[in-house]
Image (cartoon, coloured by chain):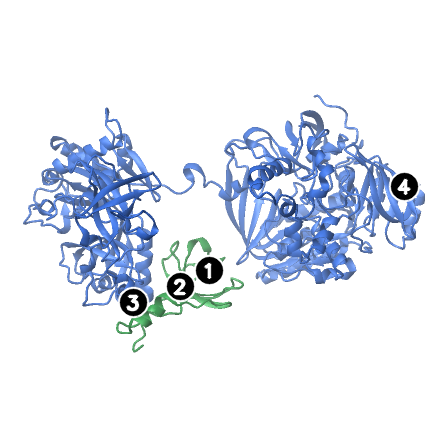
Chain colours: A blue, B green
């Protein structure tokens, strides 16, 4: 194993496995850490202080925290397609072979060319986009923006498709707990003992929260022992589920919570058949937020120098990871809790340079600790840090009373107090409320069913965390109806927590509020001077709190400084609105398996497998895959195949799978009345054994859908819809049935998937069907006339439905069999049809034949047309009420100059007609004023041997024979076309009736 | 969001489709154009409790009348919408 010694690793202690060394690379250099390390702790153990460059000024940055609030130590983790930018080194678990690279530097982290930005710092102040790069205006897009984007930024996305899988899952419980610190574990104990179904989510890979770093004594046991005893008890309870590496990131309506589980992020790549991450939606009756609190920095000049670290994070690195961020530590605190870092450092054998305490009084206990540890206590504040990319060297102190002092140290621990993690409790616009005694915001107005406990609720003592957590867990279980005995709460002493609020120390040099977005104290002050005083304006003007860490360490300091300069109190200044997610969540996790070919469900027609065998080209139609055409060897393009298919149908016989049409059985004594009300034409007078074309309007009078409906019995109609509207028409009809016409005795059943339906068309259709249908069935024009519809027996006895309807304009039947017989029917049609040259045809040929016949379809039923526009106005019954009747009569919907369906063909027969071309009268300038409509559908008509189309044209039907222009600016075309009868083929319909 | 369907029990939002205001009833046949215009286009935009039509298409296909607070998404009542939009006799 390569890599140097771990210069900053303690010889014993810590929750790391020294028997499992792991080698890893950072910026190409090899290091060694241990199982149980994070990337951050392993870098610290190896003496690495410089881990990144800042966003705007490219300042050298180190590791500030030990958790998900980290603003600085962002790296690109992994390589190639798995390269993930902006990964927090503090959250990345170490694994063998881990590769990480620092971000936003060139050519290297130590010698970053763009650090020159610091010299231009005055132009990068708050709002600099709006001020500096205004003139000349056209320079913005061409020069300024690209240059700024190159210089400022974070990591690079992989740029290659993510090779991993992501999963989505649901879970349900009585009590959901966020966090496994003392409050969370106590809540789980109480709820679990009460008999509740409990889920506890912990974002760390180890359970215990701050107990892992700060220890303590609970029920007389050392914290570590209490944790293992508690986990054993929870494991023995019937329904307590503990999820590590899982962050609760959001709360949604009705007690639904979002959580992201990093299932395999701690491995180089997920094991085979396993997902990388899983997005959970957890439905919980109650939620206890025991998410703890976040230590806050104090803003002073040079506070971003590598080696400046949160005091609690330093304890975590020393105690949990046995890694020492510094050899000679200074501590700057304004509160009692910060002193624990001095105790920890001394206990680990580190030198303490000094403790700088901003408070007036220091307790006798701490005075004696100082004399024992041989360090001085300075009453004052840190006003500056000397150092750079190699870390902290010297610290300037402004003493209370005005004197100055200097302290030499290679690390500075800072504690400005603690902020409860109020994110989750504030996501439904709850506004946290200010508490003076801890100088922090605590949760208020949490979503229904949610309560905060312990440090997340501003109760910082260990004893208080246990008490509050336990009480919240018991109450949550009881609210959820679980009333078992919770037993006694674990107990511990409460530590003292007194602080004197301190947000900002005046000094020379940049003092950072938001590390990740390089927002300084002077930026906040400038924003105030320029009138951006509201916190929401402050946020957007300076981008404070808008980085990937969402300002977890910076928001409160920013608004405290704003409060100070604007002469208001902090609660008056207020907080910005909190929004999920609590931590960044990969879009891949939200997508889950919904990507590539599984982006949506795929519906296959009954003939799909057969069609695939034939080499059919498929087209996506909604969720369906439909055969578009069936190419044959030697055909040079789609047009040649489609033309052949059309000619085969018109000259012989062909068939097409039309199973994708929506199919609805309408049953009941009032079925006919019901259909009369939903269609513009009448169906109650339709004879049994007959089919009729029907048109539905929306209630606003515009066309909704069309299709053929057949009457199979007195009280049984079989209704078809277009493929696109199948689901919507069902929904609409159910609305009519249930909500509007409850008095009608009628039932609707969707049978779209139950029937395979094929159109068999062409002059030889009967010849073919005679081979399929039982010879006893009469298919003659007299025995089965046009628009006939009835059940028939097939050869072999299978019952089928036969409808004599035609979309192609040819003599045609639609034959319908139970879906499971669909494929067999197709194979039979092919076999029996061979002597007649039967030809399967796809949706393109279907479309060509419908345009030739002037039938309207999707492009004409486009939600803006009336029945009259489509040439179907005469179908509107005047003898009954129907959906859309009244509104269809409005002035504008019956105006004589409406655009109506008309046929269109180029005057030059060789010319290709394109849909979308605008219709402009001859001799007029193309433009909106002279735009009289457009071409909706086109095809090459093999029958007419030229391109033809349908269009919606102003007064189109009165203008048959007129020559106009098809103007197509998109394709740069303009050509003459003739408006004509939309029925290009067999206008008197003799063929379909024959 | 979760809706407790009176036929299926508590189900997730994804099973339902929203339509809108459940207040208007379809005017009687002879009510005239103005009444129908109001029915088709005029909708209350309530800040607070509002009764709405929802369709349980991913379940029992029932149309439901749901009382939802548009400010908080709190759902207080869910009942079958049977006849809710029917023309009132004599209206």
C-alpha gap between disc 3 and disc 2: 15 Å
Question: Which residue sits at x=33%, y=68%?
Answer: B37
Mark 4 or 1, closer to the camera: 4
Q: On the image, which quarter does residue A40 sit in?
A: top right
Circle 1 — which element? strand
Rounded to the nearest whole Å, what is the CA distance between mark 3 and mark 4?
A: 87 Å
Quadrant (top left/top right/bottom left/bottom right) for the C terminus of chain A: top left
Q: Nearer the viewer, residue A846 or A523?
A: A523
Q: Which residue is mark 2?
A: B64
Which residue, given by chain and number where applicable, does mark 3 sit on?
Answer: A741
Left or right: A513 as drawn, with respect to B44: right
| Tag 3 and tag 2 share a subunit | no
Q: Residues within 10 Å of mark 2 (few under 14, many from 20)?
A: many
Q: Is residue A241 something that shows in the picture?
A: no
Mark 3 falls on what kind of element? loop
Q: In the structure shown, which secondary structural element does the residue marked by tag 4 occupy?
A: strand
> Residue A977 falls in which quadrant of the image?
top left
Residue contact at pointers 3 and 2, CB within 8 angstroms = no
Residue located beneath label 1 in the image:
B3
> What residue sits 25% from the left and 61% below the top?
A895
- The circle on residue A406 is 4
> For the residues marked 1 and 3, what is the alpha-carbon distance in whole angstroms?
25 Å
First reached walking from the N terminus: tag 3 or tag 4: 4
Nearer the observer: mark 3 or 4; the answer is: 4
> Are the numbered discs 4 and 1 placed on the same chain, yes or no?
no
**Is residue A438 placed above or below A23 in the rendered structure?**
below
Q: Crowdedness of circle 3 by 10 Å Cα count: few (<14), some, many (20+)?
A: many
**Where does residue A10 sit, x and y in percent of width and height?**
80, 33
Location of residue A23 with respect to A393 vertically, above or below:
above
- Disc 2 and disc 4 on one polypeptide chain: no
Q: Residue at x 94, y 44 (%)?
A: A371
Judge whether residue A504 can be spotted in this image. yes
């Amino acid at each position: 194993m390569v890599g140097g010694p771990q210069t900053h690793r303690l010889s014993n202690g810590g929750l790391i496995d020294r028997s499992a060394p792991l080698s890893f690379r950072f910026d190409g250099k090899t290091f060694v850490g241990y199982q149980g390390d994070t990337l951050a702790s392993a870098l610290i153990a190896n003496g690495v202080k410089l881990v990144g460059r800042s966003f705007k000024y490219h300042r050298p940055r180190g590791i500030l925290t030990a958790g998900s609030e980290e603003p600085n130590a962002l790296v690109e983790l992994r390589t190639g397609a798995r390269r993930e930018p902006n990964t927090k080194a503090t959250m990345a678990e170490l694994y063998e072979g881990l590769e990480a690279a620092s971000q936003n530097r060139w050519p290297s982290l130590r010698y970053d060319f763009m650090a020159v930005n610091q010299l231009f710092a005055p132009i990068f102040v708050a709002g600099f986009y709006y001020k500096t790069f205004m003139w000349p205006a056209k320079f913005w897009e061409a020069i300024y923006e690209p240059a700024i984007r190159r210089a400022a930024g974070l990591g690079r996305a992989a740029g290659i498709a993510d090779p991993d899988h992501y999963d989505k899952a649901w879970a349900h419980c009585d009590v959901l707990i966020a966090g496994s610190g003392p409050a969370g574990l106590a809540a789980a104990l109480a709820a679990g003992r009460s008999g509740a179904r409990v889920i506890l989510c912990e974002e760390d890979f180890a359970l215990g929260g701050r107990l892992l770093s700060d220890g303590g004594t609970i029920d007389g046991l050392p914290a570590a022992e209490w944790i293992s005893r508690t986990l054993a008890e929870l494991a023995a309870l019937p329904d307590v589920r503990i999820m590590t590496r899982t962050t609760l990131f959001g709360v949604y309506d009705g007690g639904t919570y979002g959580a992201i589980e990093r299932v395999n992020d701690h491995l180089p790549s997920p094991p085979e058949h396993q997902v990388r991450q899983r997005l959970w939606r957890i439905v919980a009756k109650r939620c206890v937020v025991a998410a703890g609190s976040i230590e806050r920095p104090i803003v002073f000049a040079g506070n971003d120098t590598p080696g400046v670290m949160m005091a609690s994070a330093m304890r975590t690195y020393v105690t949990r990871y046995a890694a020492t961020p510094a050899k000679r530590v200074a501590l700057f605190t304004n509160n009692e809790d910060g002193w624990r870092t001095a105790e920890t450092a001394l206990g680990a054998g580190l030198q303490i340079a000094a403790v700088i305490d901003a408070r007036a009084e220091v307790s006798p206990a701490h005075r004696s600790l100082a004399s024992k540890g041989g360090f001085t206590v300075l009453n004052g504040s840190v006003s500056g840090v000397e150092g750079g990319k190699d870390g902290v060297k010297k610290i300037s102190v402004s003493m209370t009373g005005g004197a100055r002092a200097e302290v030499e140290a290679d690390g500075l621990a800072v504690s400005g107090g603690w902020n409860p993690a109020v994110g989750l409790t504030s996501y439904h616009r709850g506004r946290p409320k200010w508490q003076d005694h801890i100088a922090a915001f605590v949760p208020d107005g949490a979503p229904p069913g949610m309560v905060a406990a312990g440090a997340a609720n501003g109760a910082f003592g260990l004893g208080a965390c246990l008490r509050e957590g336990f009480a919240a867990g018991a109450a949550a279980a009881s609210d959820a109806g679980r009333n078992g005995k919770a037993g006694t709460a674990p107990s511990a002493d409460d530590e003292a927590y007194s602080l004197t609020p301190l947000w900002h120390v005046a000094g020379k040099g940049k003092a950072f509020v938001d590390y990740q977005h390089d927002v300084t104290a002077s930026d906040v002050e400038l924003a105030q001077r320029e009138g951006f005083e509201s916190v929401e304006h402050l946020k957007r003007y300076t981008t404070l709190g808008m980085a990937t860490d969402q300002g977890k360490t910076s928001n409160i300091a920013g608004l405290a400084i704003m409060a100070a300069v604007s002469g208001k109190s902090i609660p008056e200044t207020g907080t910005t609105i909190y929004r999920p997610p609590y931590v960044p969540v990969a879009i891949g996790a939200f997508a889950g398996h919904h990507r590539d070919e599984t982006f949506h469900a795929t519906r296959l027609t009954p003939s799909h497998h057969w069609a695939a065998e034939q080499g059919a080209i498929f087209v996506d139609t909604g969720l369906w895959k439909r055969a578009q055409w069936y190419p044959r060897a030697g055909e040079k393009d789609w047009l040649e195949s489609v033309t052949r298919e059309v000619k085969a149908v018109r000259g012989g016989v062909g068939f097409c799978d039309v199973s994708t049409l929506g199919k609805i059985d309408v049953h009941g004594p009032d079925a006919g009345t019901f259909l009369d009300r939903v269609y513009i034409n009448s169906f109650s007078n339709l004879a049994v054994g007959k089919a009729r074309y029907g048109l539905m309007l929306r209630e606003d009078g515009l066309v909704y859908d069309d299709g053929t409906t057949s009457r199979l019995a007195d009280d049984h109609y079989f209704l078809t819809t277009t493929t696109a509207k199948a689901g919507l028409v069902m929904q609409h009809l159910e609305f009519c049935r249930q909500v509007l016409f409850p008095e009608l005795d009628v039932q609707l059943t969707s049978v779209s998937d139950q029937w395979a339906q094929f159109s068999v068309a062409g002059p030889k259709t009967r010849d073919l069907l005679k081979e399929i249908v039982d010879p006893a069935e009469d298919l003659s024009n007299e025995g089965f006339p046009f628009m006939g519809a009835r059940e028939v027996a097939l050869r072999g006895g299978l019952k089928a439905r036969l409808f004599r309807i035609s979309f192609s304009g040819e003599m045609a039947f639609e034959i319908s069999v139970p879906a499971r017989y669909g494929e067999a029917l197709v194979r039979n049609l092919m076999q029996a049809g061979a002597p007649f040259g039967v030809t399967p045809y796809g949706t393109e040929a279907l479309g060509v034949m419908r345009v030739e016949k002037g039938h309207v379809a999707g492009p004409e039923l486009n939600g803006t047309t009336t029945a009259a526009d489509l040439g179907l106005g005469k179908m509107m019954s005047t003898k009954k009420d129907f959906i859309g009747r009244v509104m269809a009569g409005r002035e504008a919907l019956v105006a004589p100059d409406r655009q109506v369906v008309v046929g269109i063909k180029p005057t030059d027969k060789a010319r290709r007609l394109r849909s979308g071309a605008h219709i402009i009268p001859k001799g007029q300038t193309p433009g909106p004023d002279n735009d009289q409509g457009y071409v909706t559908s086109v095809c090459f008509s093999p029958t007419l041997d030229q391109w033809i189309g349908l269009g919606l044209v102003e007064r189109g039907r009165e203008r048959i024979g007129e020559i106009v222009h098809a103007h197509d600016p998109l394709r740069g075309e303009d050509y003459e076309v003739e408006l004509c009868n939309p029925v290009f083929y067999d206008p008197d319909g003799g063929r379909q009736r024959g | 969001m979760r809706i407790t369907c009176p036929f299926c029990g508590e189900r997730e939002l994804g099973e339902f489709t929203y339509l809108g205001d459940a207040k208007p009833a379809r005017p009687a046949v002879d009510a005239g154009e103005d009444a129908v215009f109001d029915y088709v286009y005029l909708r209350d935009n309530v800040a607070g409790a509002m009764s709405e039509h929802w369709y349980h298409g991913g379940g029992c296909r029932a149309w439901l009348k749901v009382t939802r607070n548009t400010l908080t998404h709190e759902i207080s009542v869910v009942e079958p919408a049977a006849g809710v939009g029917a023309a009132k006799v004599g209206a």
